Image (cartoon, coloured by chain):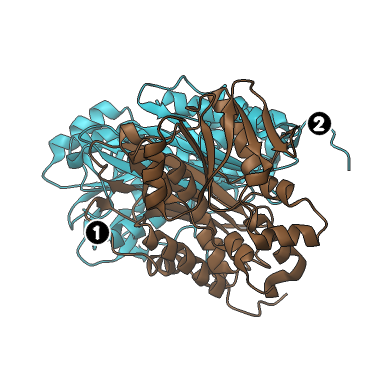
Chain colours: A cyan, B brown
Amino acid sequence: VRALSTTVSDRTEGELIATIQAQLRPAPSWIAVGIGDDAAVVEPERNRLEVLTVDAQVDGVHFDRHFVPADAIGHRALAVNLSDIAAMGAEPRLALLSLALPADWPLEDFERFAEGFGRLAAAHGVHVVGGNLTRTPGPLVIDVTVIGSVKRRAVLARRGARAADAVFVSGAIGSAAAGLSQLRQFGPDAPINACIERYLRPEPRVRLGTLLGRNRAASACMDLSDGLAEGAHQLAAASGVGIAIDAGVVPIEPDARAWSERCGRDPVVDAVTGGDDYELMFTCRPRLGGRFRTVARQCGLTLTNVGVCTADGLVSLERDGRSEPMPRGYGHFR
Amino acid sequence: VRALSTTVSDRTEGELIATIQAQLRPAPSWIAVGIGDDAAVVEPERNRLEVLTVDAQVDGVHFDRHFVPADAIGHRALAVNLSDIAAMGAEPRLALLSLALPADWPLEDFERFAEGFGRLAAAHGVHVVGGNLTRTPGPLVIDVTVIGSVKRRAVLARRGARAADAVFVSGAIGSAAAGLSQLRQFGPDAPINACIERYLRPEPRVRLGTLLGRNRAASACMDLSDGLAEGAHQLAAASGVGIAIDAGVVPIEPDARAWSERCGRDPVVDAVTGGDDYELMFTCRPRLGGRFRTVARQCGLTLTNVGVCTADGLVSLERDGRSEPMPRGYGHFR
């Protein structure tokens, strides 16, 4: 088989690194040694804790390069990590980018990937201080490590919720799952709509997370990478509470609802089990409503009270006056 | 095809994480939030810079799980990162472990992997604060991020060498390449010898790196992941000098030399182009020999003066009174 177009294997490692660097902003003075040495050397921020996360995106598992444009692959690979940083109440600061590249990946896609990654990094003031490039005989794998920082008193975690705390979600859920379903059905030429855009280029809720932390408005917080249902199970388990979600108020975009109905599926079940929205779910003490209102005014997002923490340890979906066990979300293994 | 033995896909993500955690030491007090939340939260060390590196190991590229035992896969995945930290003069502190697992990986191998990783982490006081698990339709990919710390005055980099500086390497080179060549030829039942052991379980030179940094004994330093030849090219380029390596004094283990000769190959070329030894190469100012001797006494390794930095910008191998261009080492891309 002859290569019909230029691929990453037509470039040296140095040339590929230069392509990525061309998308990055100049290194600030707190980076003592940046890309190009055995490791990066940076000055930590004073009087702040560090927040660290790593997430991998695998072609054919987390995305499909046949219908996800390369710039969106780059955007998503960073966004999923920024969302984790946001869920802790922290501000992202730096990233490491590790890529396992199949030899046949078109060079143009690699360039678009670097653009998408670099654009989101710039939007959040994130500096790429290092990384790794390797070839792979398998699918494209993108591993991103992001480090942020947060004041000790502003740290959010999954474990602080108590019975009677109110449960909130930001924005709308189920949109990304509807978008993915449409991309799978119609392929890369699917007419772009809000659901598809949400799947391709999710907006990590960094501003909301830092506002919740700074104002001490949330007793627990996590991001909804695997969906509201899975998130409710995990937050409940970490905090030792139950969670009852009111199906009637779950915020679902009209387009996502319409897509579920067109497919003959239950829009609420689709919305709570669908992942990839990267909204935040958080809990608030019932008496601290003033703090919540401060955050709600400043964050620029709709925040919906979707349920309440309970003492019974059960995670349930309340609909039409009845309580159903909350379904489980997506898991990579058994 | 029916699964004949238990594989990672027979376990939940939580069970796999628990398997890894069972190999780790208890979290110290500077880890405020560890494994199990959206991200880890740690307290940075005071008055030190942070050193960050990420390296990926891909089955079929960096190792082959048909002849590399699973504990050695875990050992190597961490060792290559510790070596990068050592090359900067830093002490490793924490790690993030991201795994893309093929569904057919035997559970027993996963457990051995966790043991090998955990054992080396414990030996170097490295705490795993988080990570990521995903399945993959492709080969096993292990991405490890390691963060260490170093005092500002002790930072080593590739860029500080000047003409007339002496060039040193630690230990012996070419052993790991000879070991890999034997494993490829004889398979997993190859009789274990020093070369094979060096390939399977390289010892990152952390003590040497920190001694060089603390004593300000080295003007430049890097690790030899891609071999001495490639290292010489890279250090020379970063420092803007030439490097002349004396072929007659390159330290080669007798077993590695014998293997090259048996294969009808040039032992010196094999040794300088062979990677995976994870020795350090460093340069010393000619007038600071006292500092070098302090390090040499304390590091417990043979340090060999293999050459000198030159003003001519050429990277050469001097043998039998003649100067040859230094070959290039391994590159993943063109």
Pointer 1: what residue?
Answer: A239
- How many residues crowd around disc 2 within 10 Å: few (fewer than 14), some, or many (20 or more)? few
Of the residues under marks 2 and 1, which one precedes in the sequence?
Answer: 2
Q: Label for residue A5?
A: 2
Q: What secondary structure is marked by label 1?
A: helix
- How many residues crowd around disc 1 within 10 Å: few (fewer than 14), some, or many (20 or more)? some
Residue at 67% x, 25% y is B314
Q: Is residue B71 visible?
A: yes
Q: Is residue A287 left or right of residue B165?
A: left
Quarter of the image containing the N terminus of chain A? top right
The one of B11 and B131 positioned closer to us in this rendering: B131
Residue at 40% x, 34% y is A41
Q: Position of residue B152 (x, y in %)?
A: 32, 32
**Disc 2 chain ID:** A
Residue at 67% x, 55% y is B177
**Disc 1 chain ID:** A
The one of A314 and A224 positioned closer to us in this rendering: A224
Q: Position of residue B304 (x, y in %)?
A: 54, 46
Give above or below for A302 relative to B280. above
